Amino acid sequence: MSKFFTSKYSALTPYKPGEQPRDKKYIKLNTNESPFPPSPRAIEAASEAAKSLQLYPDPTYRALHEAIAAYHGITPDEVLLTNGSDEILNFAFMAFCDKEHPAAFPNITYGFYSVFATLNHVPYTELPLNPDFTVNKADYMGTRDTLFIANPNAPTGLALSLDEIEEIVRSNPNRVVVVDEAYVDFGGDTAVPLIKQYDNLLVTRTFSKSRSMAGARLGYGVGSKELIRDLNTIKYSTNPYNVNSMSAAAGLGVMADEDYTVKNCAEIIRVREYTKAALKDLGFEMTDSLGNFLFVRHPRIKGEKIYKALRKRGILVRHFDSVLISAYNRITVGTMEEMKALVAAMADIVKE
Ligand code: PMP
């Protein structure tokens, strides 16, 4: 820390992203990226947009807002495009949380929520999950907190039903409920249609997973016009051109190629279910994940040991430091070929 670093941030422990190793070629199953390349239409649109990089983007991103709104059956002023969904989550902490509106989220969930809370000086409560990692809905009913719920949750992959989400939203009419749907395209039910009924619901989505565009940094939030207006106040007070022109163009390209996304999601679900069955045959235990990842432990072998043994065999997965989940590894679902290699490596490790 330099002597110039403000005390405002000295307590901040930054989010630790998954490794992006350069030392050798791994089978990379550690950051929930898609194993498939972006849609050719996204690549073509981004290349075309590169020819006009001397210009600022249209800060309203009108065309992409319209495409997203058409996809969800809502209006463009119910959408806000951001630099990855991380940005809309940070905007939500900035706009809807303070000492009178503290944040609450599960004690096992996306690690960035607590970082955003600390960054924005927002007090927060971590609500314990049940021993089987399910959310205890009662903890989220009628609270005084701004709620952040990843649905499906990460890294467990477990989801609340749409009815349960609606009950939570309905029971907190004076608090914003943020439903983070980064992984919803792999099997969860979206809460987006509920925004017409509930002015306190913000749903966040990303192009990073099902749309194979993690490198483009594209995400968005969906909510009532009033919520979106507040979030726009934050956007225009921080970075009006928060999405670069190539990413916005790529976003339009992939939205026009929905068959590609649907086909890739179906394949990831097929490979996920194959991997679940194959790992269970080897004695592994796991949640019934609806994400593009599995959350896996072995009754006899420590999580960290499995992580290291896989790494030695050129396969990278995610092991978390938290004691609550140190027995587990989170394994992104890759291609069938990659997952067959993972299963073979696991068979080897179990035999050792
Ligand atoms: N929410 C959850 C639950 C995530 O796992 C991630 C990705 N790590 C994000 C949001 C953020 O993704 P992005 O910023 O790439 O949209």
Image: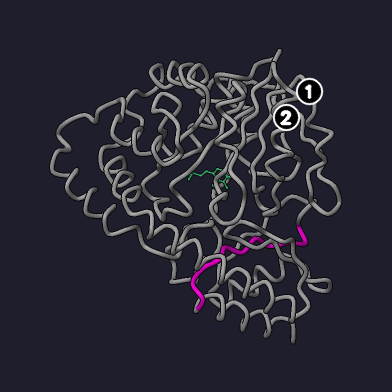
Q: Earlier in the sequence, mark 2 or mark 1?
A: 2
Identified by mark 2, the residue type is Ala
Q: Mark on residue 157?
A: none
Ligand 1 is within 8 Å of the C-beta of the residue at disc 2: no
Which residue lies at the image location 63% right of the left edge and 27% below the top edge?
117
Which residue lies at the image location 72% right of the left edge and 61% below the top edge?
288
Left or right of residue 109: residue 183: left
Identify whether 177 is placed above or below 247.
above
Left or right of residue 67: residue 33: right
State the extent of the magenta-drawn residues as a range. Answer: 326-336
The image shows residue 2 at horizontal and vertical percentages of 51, 28
Between residues 11 and 221, which one lies in front from this camera angle? 221
> For residue 194, what is the image quadrant?
top right
- Check disc 2 and report its element: helix, strand or loop: strand
The residue under label 2 is 104
The residue under label 1 is 143
The image shows residue 279 at horizontal and vertical percentages of 70, 76
C-beta proximity under 8 Å, tags 2 and 1? yes
Residue 188 is inside the magenta segment: no
Left or right of residue 255: residue 305: right
Residues at marks 2 and 1, CA–CA distance in whole angstroms? 9 Å
